[in-house]
Amino acid sequence: MRKNSAFNPPVSTVFSVLFELFKTISKISGLSYKHLCTRQSTCFSRCFGMDRKIKTLIRAGYYSSEFEVIKDAMISLFRENTELKINAAIELYKGGEVSLGKAVEIAGVTTIEFKEILGKRGIIREIEARPAEKMDRKLKKYLQT
């Protein structure tokens, strides 16, 4: 673990990842999602027997809170597990929560690679285009100037 980490992702990204993690833990553990969400850090640390280690790291000054420990663990998890990053990016993209470009960034692959992955998994990309008439009007206007 590191003290004074320079890498700080947006809090909204961390919450989004934690939200998905708790949904998964809820399915696996049988605990209600509401229970997990109201007691996020406590439940997370107890579910995996990490309470003592987490409290030790906080007491030693490596982290300021349980949330910071979990955030750092999640960052490490996604950094080390490429397939997990790709899966998260695909799910966010499929749900319309991120653009193709943002999904590529999250997955840590090139646009071409990401499109190939989508194709291999049978995920159809929907491309939104302007009506041809509107594009023709703009083109004529542009050519007239």
Image (spheres, rainbow, N blue to C red):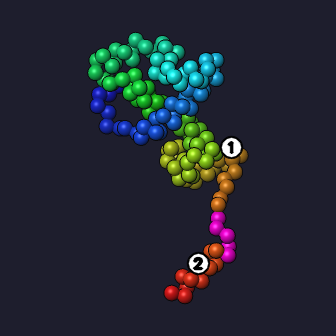
Span shown in magenta = 129-133
Residue 145 locus on image (x, y percent)? 51, 87
Residue 5 locus on image (x, y percent)? 32, 33
Q: Which mark is residue 80?
A: none
Q: Residue at x 67, y 76 (%)?
A: 133
- Seen from this angle, which residue lies furthest right? 122
Residue 131 locus on image (x, y percent)? 67, 70
Q: Is residue 91 magenta?
A: no
Q: Tell me the amino acid under the disc marked 2.
A: Lys
**Mark 1 = which residue?**
121
Q: Which mark is residue 138?
A: 2
Whether 96 is drawn above or below 33: the answer is: below
Q: Residue at x 46, y 35 (%)?
A: 14
Residue 2 locus on image (x, y percent)? 32, 28
Q: Earlier in the sequence, mark 2 or mark 1?
A: 1
Between 52 and 32, the one nearer to me in the picture: 32
User: Under tag 1, what secondary structure?
Assistant: loop
Asked if residue 72 lies left or right of residue 88, the reply is: left
